Image (spheres, helix red, strand yellow):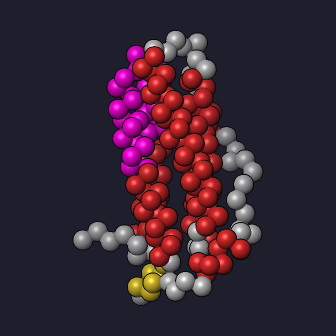
């Protein structure tokens, strides 16, 4: 059982709100994305963010979660199916941008840009929080979550780059 300082508790409450935002965003974006591949990516990210949220809640309850157990846990039921046709219909009719073999929908690009910005921000908040905790085990959990947030950003970046949405000059 860990005993959190007021500052540590406040930092975890901030991370909790960030993780809840990510869960909500990715669930919503999975429903709103035009591309089935992007829908799937957002759904997967939502599940990982839920794991982060669960870890933060455990920390707030004084329990250090087993981060190795989370990596091996089953993905659980998929909350977002592809039957959100009414929500997506307005975007299906939107003309995609064609860049040779890279075709994308402008709305999907906006969802990706917002998601990538969110991941950058949240990774930075974990970077700060890691330095504020006394307990080495808590720092390791936060470091693990931060690494996964960076991996989420990489997945979004890779999706964007492969679909002509993000071009490095």
Q: Locate the C terminus by quadrant.
A: bottom left
Q: Is residue 16 visible?
A: yes
| Position of the N terminus by quadrant | top right
Q: Position of residue 49 (x, y in %)?
A: 57, 44
Farthest left residue?
Answer: 169
> How far across and how far down the image is residue 39, in percent?
61, 65
Residue at coordinates 54% horizontally, 13% vertically from top-left? 2
In the rendered view, tell whether residue 120 sits above or below residue 67: below
Read off the magenta span: 119-146
Q: Please report the residue visible at 65 percent of the width from the left and 64 percent of the height from the top.
A: 31
Residue 135 visible within the image: no
Of residues 2 and 137, the one drawn nearer to the viewer in this rendering: 2
The percent coordinates of residue 162 (x first, y second) are: 44, 72
Above or below, 86 against 21 in this view is below
Q: Tell me, yes or no, whether the highlighted magenta stretch contains residue 86.
A: no
**Residue 124 sits inside the magenta stretch:** yes
Residue 134 % position (x, y):
40, 16
Residue 99 against residue 85 in the figure, above or below: below
Instruction: Pick whichever, 136 or 42, lies toward us.
Output: 42
Residue 104 is left or right of residue 24, and the answer is left
- Magenta segment's dominant SS is helix
At a point 46% along the width and 25% down the height, the residue shown is 10
- In-image side of 165 versus 86 (left or right): left
């Amino acid at each position: 059982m860990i005993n959190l300082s007021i500052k540590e508790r406040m930092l975890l409450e901030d991370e909790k709100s960030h993780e809840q935002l990510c869960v909500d965003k990715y669930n919503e974006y999975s429903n709103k994305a035009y591309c089935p591949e992007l829908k799937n990516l957002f759904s997967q990210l939502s599940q990982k963010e839920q794991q982060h949220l669960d870890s933060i809640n455990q920390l707030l309850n004084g329990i250090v979660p087993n981060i190795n157990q989370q990596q091996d846990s089953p993905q659980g039921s998929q909350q977002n199916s592809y039957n959100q046709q009414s929500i997506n219909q307005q975007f299906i009719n939107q003309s995609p941008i064609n860049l040779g073999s890279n075709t994308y929908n402008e709305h999907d690009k906006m969802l990706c840009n917002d998601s990538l910005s969110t991941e950058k921000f949240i990774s930075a908040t974990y970077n700060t929080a890691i330095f504020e905790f006394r307990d080495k085990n808590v720092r390791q959990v936060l470091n693990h979550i931060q690494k996964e947030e960076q991996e989420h950003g990489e997945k979004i970046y890779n999706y964007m780059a492969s679909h002509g949405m993000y071009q490095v000059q």
